[in-house]
Each structure stands twice: as C-alpha cells, then as structure tokens.
Image (tube, rainbow, N blue to C red):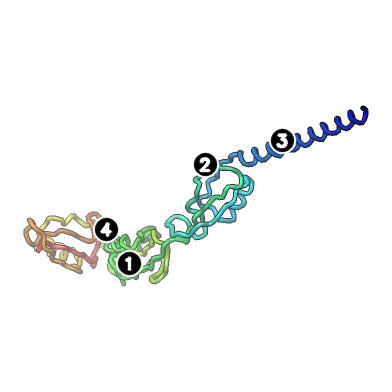
C-alpha cells in the first residue's frame, strides 16, 4: 500500500513537471513568434549601420538591389520593405535597395561664353549655375565667362552647381541694359553701338503675326549691368 502511494506521488509529480515545462516552452514560442516590433527608418543609412540598428530589434536586413539616386550617395539605403514604423515579427527580414550613386554629367567648356546664355544649356544636361563671381578684365568682354568650377571635362553628379568667374569688362562707364523686346532692331542697333556695345550675333527667326525686324529675344537681359565692349545677342523676327 505504501509503495503504491509513493509510486502514485512520484508519477503525478513527474507529470506535473512535464506539463510545467511543456507549458513554458509553448508560452515562449507564442511570445517569440507573436511579439511585434516597429521597423526603424533606414533611409540614408549604410548597410552596416542598418545591420547594427536592426540587431537590437532582432531583425535582419537583406540587400535586394542597386539604383541610381540624385539625393543619396553610393552605399546609402534609398528604399526599404516593409516601410518605416510598420510592426513586424521578430527575426523578420527587412529588404533594402542601395544607392548606386548619383548620375554623372560631364562639365562642358563654358570659358569665353556669355554668362547669360549658358543657363539653358546647363539645365538641359542637368546642371545649374550658382556661386558666381564678377571681376573687371581688359582681356574679356563684359559678360564673358573667364573660368568656372568644376573644370571642363570633369564628371560630377547630376544636379550640381557650376560656379563661374564672369568678366565685367575693363573699368569704365557702366549702364543698365534696357528692355529691347518689341522694339525695331533698325533703331535699337545704332543706339547700342553709340554706347560702345557690340552686336555679337543677330539671328532672324520667322514668327507668325509679328512684323519683320522686331526684337524677340535679347542677351544680356533687361536690368543686367553693361558697359563698352559688352557683347549683345539679338533674336529678330524675319
């Protein structure tokens, strides 16, 4: 009788311990696979930074591609899936796309070109003017580009700015360029020449409903500082 009682007690104790550990394991698995954590924002970070950041949240990062990007340098994360702040399970994989760098553009040679005329050309190839300086020069006519940075032939990221050193011409009497649009070229040209300005180019373009000889476009633009020997470009209706 005593043996049966001891056996029964031992059996139920062992059964209780097994049930306890089984319940603990099941609870741990439920907790492990059911816990959700928010995904951090990885944009602008390197792959190594992302791995370090995600390790604290028991998440992993997988690189799924490369793509050119105008904003982020090469090696920076530009896209992630799932997105930032989405809640995911522990040990979830976060897939990211890495920047392959900015698209490169070759800097054209702008030296000895009219400063006012190069803006549209730069826009076409994805560059901008900016940070320009002006100096007096007896060698270069007013408005001419003496030098620029970055230098001609350099490869730079698309969207970069080109800083130009622009001639103000030799020191002398200065004027403000008037508005020539809509005026007769036959009257304007002699007046410009009387002020010492030089007609560098006169293009005739056919415009419907506009009589011939009317100025349609001018460089330098209205309000630009000019002086003797400044080069003037005119577009006139044909």
Question: Which residue, given by chain and number where applicable, does mark 4 sit on?
Answer: 225
Q: Residue furthest right?
A: 2
Mark 4 or mark 3, whichever is nearer to me: 3
Tally of marks: 4
CB within 8 Å, label 2 to label 3: no
Residue 187, quarter of picture = bottom left
Quadrant of the snapshot with the N terminus:
top right
10 Å crowding of disc 4: few (<14), some (14-19), many (20+): some
> In terms of secondary structure, where does tag 1 sit?
strand
Q: Position of residue 185 (x, y in %)?
A: 11, 62
Whole-number angstrom distance, CA of label 1 to CA of label 2: 53 Å
- Of the image marks 4 and 1, the number of the one nearer the N terminus: 1
Task: Report the disc number at residue 145.
Answer: 1
- Of the image marks 3 and 1, the number of the one nearer the N terminus: 3
Whole-number angstrom distance, CA of label 2 to CA of label 4: 57 Å
Quadrant of the snapshot with the C terminus:
bottom left
- Of the image marks 1 and 2, the number of the one nearer the N terminus: 2
Question: Which residue, given by chain and number where applicable, does mark 3 sit on?
Answer: 23
Whole-number angstrom distance, CA of label 4 to CA of label 1: 15 Å
Q: Residue furthest front?
A: 1
């Amino acid at each position: 009788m005593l043996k049966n009682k001891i056996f029964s007690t031992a059996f139920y104790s062992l059964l209780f311990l097994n049930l306890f550990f089984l319940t603990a394991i099941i609870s741990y698995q439920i907790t492990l696979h059911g816990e959700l954590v928010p995904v951090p924002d990885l944009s602008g970070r390197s792959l190594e930074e992302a791995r370090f950041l995600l390790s604290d949240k028991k998440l992993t990062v997988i690189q799924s591609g490369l793509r050119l990007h105008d904003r982020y340098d090469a090696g920076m994360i530009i896209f992630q899936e799932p997105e930032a702040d989405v809640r995911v399970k522990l040990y979830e994989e976060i897939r990211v796309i890495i920047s392959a760098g900015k698209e490169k553009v070759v800097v054209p040679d702008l030296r000895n070109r009219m400063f006012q005329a190069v803006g549209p050309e730069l826009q076409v190839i994805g560059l901008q003017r900016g940070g320009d300086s002006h100096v007096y020069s007896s060698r270069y006519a007013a408005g001419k580009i003496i030098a620029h940075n970055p230098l001609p032939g350099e490869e730079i990221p698309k969207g970069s700015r080109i800083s130009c050193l622009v001639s103000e011409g030799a020191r002398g009497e200065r004027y403000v360029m008037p508005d020539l649009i809509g005026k007769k070229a036959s009257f304007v040209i002699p007046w410009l020449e009387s002020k010492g300005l030089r007609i560098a180019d006169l293009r005739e373009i056919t415009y419907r409903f506009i009589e011939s000889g009317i100025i349609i476009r001018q460089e330098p633009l209205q309000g630009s500082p000019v002086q003797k020997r400044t080069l003037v470009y005119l577009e006139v209706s044909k």
